[in-house]
Amino acid sequence: ERSLSAPHELALAQALGWPLDDGRLPWAARAAQRDGLAVEQRAFGQLTPVHLHVGTEQVTLTDPAALALPAADARALFDALHPLFGDAGFTLHWGEAHRWTLEHPSLAELATASLDRVVGRHIDAWLPAHGASRAWQRLLSEAQMLLHAHAVNARREAGDLPTVNS
């Protein structure tokens, strides 16, 4: 119930012969490799453009597929976030509209929940709580502010579409 990795991810990781390190399965590195990046001795994470639904008592992650984010809009958001992550020492790589890869040594130690575990749920229980995550959470807050003011989101909001707010 509290596993950071979804059961199907753990089963597939086991079938691939990976160590079952909950929250640290190398899915992002595998995607980065498929995207043509060299992954040896490098730490990767996956970024997914999402909409967080803010309620009166909780914040819930909505299904990223519900955004139906066109590739051009995703690329505009990616390009806007690229310098922010770069200034913080992270390298952001384009994968596809709904999957970007982030590279930084600190990601090797950061256990994170699979999107499949968090979609439709209150996010607080799934956020990393240890010290290494504080800088990461600060960076995500800055990204949220940048996304809030972005023209893509202004157009989405005007069209009564959910915004990409995280």
Image: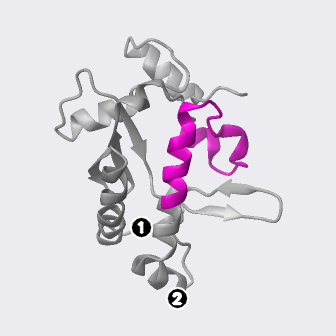
Q: Amino acid at mark 2?
A: Ala
Q: Is residue 57 left or right of residue 116?
A: right
CA separation, marks 2 and 1?
Answer: 15 Å
Q: Which one is in front in this view, the residue at disc 2 or the one at disc 1? A: 2
The residue located at (30%, 51%) in the rendering is 86
Q: Which residue is mark 2?
A: 158
Name above or below for residue 87 compared with residue 113.
below
Q: Is residue 76 magenta?
A: no
Image position of 164 (left or right of 105):
right
The residue at 71%/64% (across/down) is: 54
Secondary structure category for the residue under label 1: loop
Residue at image location 48% in from the left, 77% down from the top:
149
The mark that comes first in sequence, 2 or 1, is 1
Picture quadrant of residue 41: top left
**Label 1 belongs to which residue?**
69
Please state the horizontal and vertical placement of residue 120, each as a whole percent of the image: 68, 51
Give the residue type at disc 1: Leu
Colour setting: one colour
Element assignment for label 2: helix
In the image shown, does 8 or 5 lie closer to the viewer?
5
Residue 139 position (above or below residue 8) = below
Characterize the magenta stretch by its predominant secondary structure.
Answer: helix
**Residue 19 placed where, x, y %?**
45, 11
Q: Which residues are magenta?
A: 114-142
Give 104 or 123, whichever is nearer the viewer: 104
Neighbours of disc 2 within 10 Å: few (<14), some (14-19), many (20+): few
Categorize mark 1 by other alpha carbons within 10 Å: few (<14), some (14-19), many (20+).
Answer: many
Q: Mark yes or no: residue 17 visible.
A: yes
Q: Position of residue 58 (x, y in %)?
A: 77, 56
Q: Nearer the viewer, residue 143 or 15?
A: 143
| Residue at left offset 50%, top offset 66% | 67
88 lies left or right of 34: right
